[in-house]
């Protein structure tokens, strides 16, 4: 069974996973999940992701949520070039530092802008 990625490209974490997989020529079945249509609440998707959020991965019987965890899984499974997730302990720690930092330092604020734009488009040009 091909590796499946459940994605809605409106979502920043989904775009991260998508771009990472594409850049590394990782083949996968693109499973489009429309958040605007509420497909995350469907019965089938509940079996893929307990937290009902995208991105989500299915690799055989194994399901995984969280964009960072998914990208690290892909990096290790497909042995992507070293610069993505270096083998060197301290270089890898630097990547981990960034991945930990970005959740609250970048992504959270990006989400706020997105939500504001969707809910009140006239407030932001
Ligand atoms: N920390 C998660 C965030 C996942 C997330 O919040 N996904 C949103 C889209 S950006 C989602 O699926 N929301 C659906 C919902 O809350 O109903 C990650 O990095 O994957």
Image (cartoon, rainbow, N blue to C red):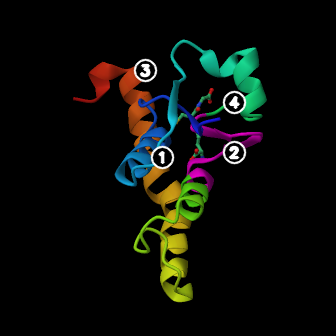
Q: Is residue 89 above or below residue 57?
A: below
Q: CA distance from mark 2 to mark 1?
A: 12 Å
Q: Say if disc 4 is inside 8 Å of ligand 1.
A: yes
Decide which of tag 1 and tag 4 comes sooner along the chain: 1
Q: Say if disc 3 is inside 8 Å of ligand 1.
A: no
Whole-percent x and y of residue 70? 59, 51
Q: Is residue 63 magenta?
A: yes
Q: Is residue 108 left or right of residue 62?
A: left
Residue at the image point whose x is 56% and y is 55% from the top = 74
The secondary structure type at the circle numbered 4 is loop
- Residue 32 disc label: none
Quickly name the residue at label 1: 17
Q: CA distance from mark 4 to mark 3?
A: 22 Å
Q: Is residue 12 left or right of residue 87?
A: left
Whole-percent x and y of residue 107? 46, 49
Quickly name the residue at label 4: 52
Ligand 1 falls in quadrant: top right
Q: CA distance from mark 1 to mark 3?
A: 26 Å
Q: Is residue 69 above or below residue 109?
A: below
Q: Say if disc 2 is inside 8 Å of ligand 1.
A: no
Quickly name the residue at label 3: 119
The secondary structure type at the circle numbered 3 is helix
Q: Say if disc 1 is inside 8 Å of ligand 1.
A: yes
């Amino acid at each position: 069974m091909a590796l499946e990625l459940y994605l809605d490209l409106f979502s920043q974490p989904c775009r991260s996973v998508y771009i990472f997989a594409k850049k590394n020529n990782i083949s996968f079945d693109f499973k489009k999940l429309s958040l605007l249509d509420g497909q995350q609440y469907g019965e089938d998707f509940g079996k893929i992701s307990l937290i009902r959020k995208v991105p989500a991965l299915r690799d055989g019987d194994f399901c995984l949520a969280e964009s960072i965890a998914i990208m690290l899984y892909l990096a290790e499974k497909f042995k992507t070039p070293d610069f993505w997730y270096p083998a060197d302990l301290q270089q890898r720690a630097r990547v981990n530092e960034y991945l930990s930092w970005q959740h609250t330092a970048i992504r959270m604020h990006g989400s706020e802008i997105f939500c504001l734009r969707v809910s009140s488009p006239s407030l932001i040009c």
